[in-house]
């Protein structure tokens, strides 16, 4: 828990709370406490989108930034045309059947 004399700074933003929560969990796994902020508009206005901020202690910022860089490098865009998703189970509709 931050002490009153410790500065809290914004590490990064993510487009939604789910993605931000993944970063917070990854930081927690590495003993860095992080909190979320900035999602109030999305809660107050249905359908509103607002980026979610991730905050850490200023003392943890350099290490958190390095961890975030590694996390971002590890994220890969999946080329679904190259992924074998298998065949539908017997009795299930395939996409071809619905077109």
Image (tube, rainbow, N blue to C red):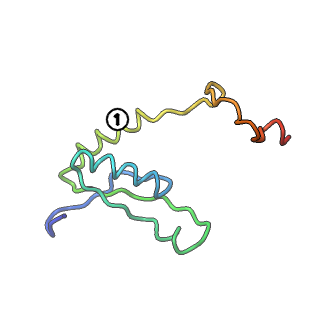
Residue closest to the eye, 93 or 46? 93
**Residue 36 at x, y percent in the picture:** 37, 61
- Secondary structure beneath dot 1 equals helix
Tell how many labels. Answer: 1
Q: Residue furthest bottom?
A: 44
Q: Residue furthest top?
A: 82
Is 23 on the left or on the right of 87, as rendered?
A: left
| Label 1 Cα crowd, 10 Å radius (few <14 / some 14-19 / many 20+) | few
Residue closest to the eye, 86 or 21? 86
Residue closest to the eye, 90 or 60? 90
Task: Say which residue appears at 38% left-offset and 51% top-offset.
Answer: 12
Image-quadrant location for residue 75: top left
**Residue 55 at x, y percent in the picture:** 31, 58
Which residue in the protein does label 1 denote? 70
Image-quadrant location for residue 53: bottom left
Is 15 on the left or on the right of 87, as rendered?
A: left
Residue closest to the eye, 92 or 9? 92
**Residue 70 at x, y percent in the picture:** 34, 35
- Vertical side of 67 occupied by 6: above or below: below
Q: Quadrant of the C terminus?
A: top right
- Vertical side of 43 occupied by 78: above or below: above
Task: Say which residue appears at 50% left-offset and 53% top-offset.
Answer: 15
**Residue 9 at x, y percent in the picture:** 28, 58
Q: Quadrant of the N terminus?
A: bottom left
């Amino acid at each position: 828990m931050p002490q009153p004399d410790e500065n809290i700074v914004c590490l990064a933003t993510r487009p939604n709370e789910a993605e931000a929560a993944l970063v917070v969990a990854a930081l927690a796994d590495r003993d860095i406490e992080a909190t979320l902020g900035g999602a109030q508009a999305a809660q107050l206005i249905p359908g509103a989108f607002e980026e979610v901020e991730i905050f850490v202690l200023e003392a943890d910022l350099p290490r958190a930034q390095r961890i975030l860089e590694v996390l971002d490098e590890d994220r890969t865009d999946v080329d679904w045309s190259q992924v074998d998703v298998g065949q539908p189970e017997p009795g299930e509709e395939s996409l071809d059947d619905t077109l």
